[in-house]
Image: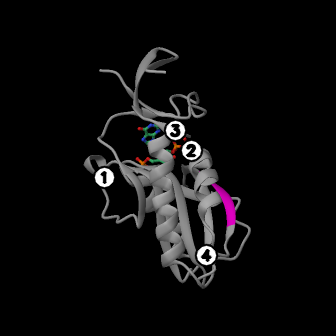
Amino acid sequence: MKSVKIKDKEFELFIESGKIANNIARVADQINADLKGKNPLFLVVLNGAFMFAAELMKKVSIPCEITFIRLASYKGTSSTESVTEILGLTESIENRTVVIVEDIVDSGNTLATLIEELKKHHPCEIKIASLLLKPGALKYDLQPDYIAMEVPPDFLVGYGLDYDGYGRNLADIYKLKN
Ligand SMILES: O=P(O)(O)OC[C@H]1O[C@H](OP(=O)(O)OP(=O)(O)O)[C@H](O)[C@@H]1O
Ligand code: HPA
């Protein structure tokens, strides 16, 4: 499919599934080499990362655990204070090597907040694996350890990424038509 319409918007084909798979395989090889013997715990951030995580974890061959979390943010007691809660983290991460699995690092806001929250639980180290990184949109001093592909700051859908809840099931990645 060269283009798709989702709700009111048109998207054009940007990255085909074969290229996505090759880049994920490369990331898995890096993880297998770097984290051997570290017994990592992969924290998959739902919803967007589900498809990347499924493909990545089939190719990660070192002993590891996988768990799935969601982030909930709400206003704290003072009107400006924003509180982020990690839902679903039942495993202890104390002294563990934790690998955050994300579909995209865009502004970096989600990841920066998540890292701050995770640090409160004293992991031994926190690694970041993301399918996509938008270097041109990043507003935080974050250095993701494992990136499958860098992309321009266009709005993307497919392979887990959604537009208003739709498009996550697309096997390729599409970008918003201008
Ligand atoms: O770097 P940022 O600017 O913070 O953007 C990246 C975040 O945005 C998306 O999550 P979203 O909150 O849309 O939830 P979803 O995973 O359920 O789609 C994506 O999955 C990342 O978590
Ligand atoms: O480009 C994007 N597409 C979908 N969801 C997103 N969340 C951050 N950036 C994006």
Point out the frontmost of discs 2 and 1: 2
Q: Is mark 2 within 8 Å of ligand 1?
A: yes
Residue 144 visible somewhere in the drawing = yes
What's the magenta region?
A: 66-71
Q: CA distance from mark 4 to mark 3?
A: 25 Å
Q: Residues within 10 Å of mark 3 (few under 14, many from 20)?
A: many
The answer to whether the beta carbon of the residue marked 3 is less than 8 Å from any atom of ligand 2 is yes
> Tag on residue 138?
1
Q: Residues within 10 Å of mark 2 (few under 14, many from 20)?
A: many
Query: Is there a contact, CB below 8 Å, between mark 2 and mark 3?
Result: yes
Nearer mark to the viewer, of 1 and 4:
4
Q: Are marks 2 and 4 in contact (CB under 8 Å)?
A: no
Q: CA distance from mark 2 to mark 3?
A: 5 Å
Label 4 crowd (10 A; few <14 / some 14-19 / many >=20): many
Dot placed on the residue nearer the N-terminal end, 2 or 3: 2
Residue 128, image x and y in percent? 47, 65
Cα distance in 3D space between marks 2 and 4: 21 Å
Mark 3 = which residue? 161
Left/right placement of residue 178 relative to residue 57 reads: left
Foreground residue, 84 or 109?
109
Judging depth in this view, the residue of 111 and 102 nearest the camera is 102
- Mark 3 and 1 residues: CB-CB less than 8 Å, in contact? no
Give the spatial CA distance, label 3 vs label 1.
Answer: 18 Å
Give the quadrant of the C terminus.
top left
Which residue position holds label 4? 40
Chief secondary structure of the magenta portion: strand
Task: Kindly identify which numbered label has been placed on residue 48.
Answer: 2
Numbered disc 4: secondary structure: loop
If you read the primary sequence from the N terminus, does the residue marked by circle 4 or circle 3 appear first?
4
The residue at label 1 has a CB less than 8 Å from ligand 1:
yes
For badge 4, the amino acid type reads: Pro
Is 50 drawn above or below residue 14 in the view shown?
below
